[in-house]
Image (cartoon, rainbow, N blue to C red):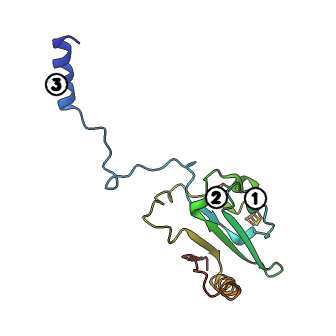
Amino acid sequence: MKLGAMINDIFESIFKHPVTEHYPFERKETPSQFRGQLQWNRENCTGCGLCAKDCPANAIEVIVLDRKAKQFVFHYNVDHCLFCAQCVHSCRQGCLSMQPQLWELAALSRDGYQLYYGNENDIQTYLASQTAAEPAATPRPAVQPVALD
Ligand code: SF4
Ligand code: SF4
């Protein structure tokens, strides 16, 4: 590189704004199609389980407590999820979406990566049945219920 061109580059660099983003103090809006954390809307859910069947990572479990009463618990294993959106495409009722704004999922421990969506009472009923079925010495995973109403 010629000396003149080098000096030119140096002066240009001095007066340019840095390209580095000051994350987490400055955040850019994520694209609307970005695949963030999975969300479940139980309004139209039939409990068919197709989303769980098609999930390549076994990240979903649909627990049917009472199909007629539409009592479902949607168990989402965030740290198993590949964010492929197969479940979103598989659901014929449009119950699933990947929230573009929920993408900061890194953590120092796996606590909180077990999400339970649904009615709070249904979640507690399901978790209580699981506890009763487990041998006493088996440690329980960390649980983060997400009540929808
Ligand atoms: S996004 Fe993919 S890996 Fe994650 S729960 Fe849905 S189907 Fe499974
Ligand atoms: S595929 Fe849709 S309707 Fe069927 S259990 Fe999953 S979320 Fe519910």
Dot 3 corresponds to which residue?
Answer: 11
Check contact, mark 3 vs mark 2: CB within 8 A. Answer: no
Residue 129 in view in this figure: yes
Disc 1 element = loop
Task: Kindly indicate the quadrant of the structure image that contains residue 13.
Answer: top left
> Of the residues under marks 3 and 1, which one precedes in the sequence?
3
Instruction: Give, as a three-letter code, the residue at label 2.
Output: Ser
Instruction: Give, as a three-letter code, the residue at label 3.
Output: Phe
Q: Residues within 10 Å of mark 1 (few under 14, many from 20)?
A: some
Residue 91's disc number: 1
Q: In the displayed structure, would residue 140 be above or below residue 88?
A: below
Q: Mark 1 and mark 2: span between their CA atoms?
A: 10 Å
Residue 97's disc number: 2
56 with respect to 26 (left or right): right
Q: In the displayed structure, would residue 3 be above or below residue 95?
A: above
Q: Is mark 1 within 8 Å of ligand 2?
A: yes
Instruction: Give, as a three-letter code, the residue at label 1.
Output: Cys
18 with respect to 69 (left or right): left
Q: In the displayed structure, would residue 87 be above or below residue 7?
A: below
Residue at image x 44%, y 50%?
29
Task: Kindly indicate the quadrant of the structure image that contains residue 49.
Answer: bottom right
Q: Residue furthest top?
A: 2
Q: Residues within 10 Å of mark 3 (few under 14, many from 20)?
A: few
Q: Is mark 2 within 8 Å of ligand 2?
A: no
Image spot of residue 125 (x, y percent)? 68, 87
Disc 2 element = strand
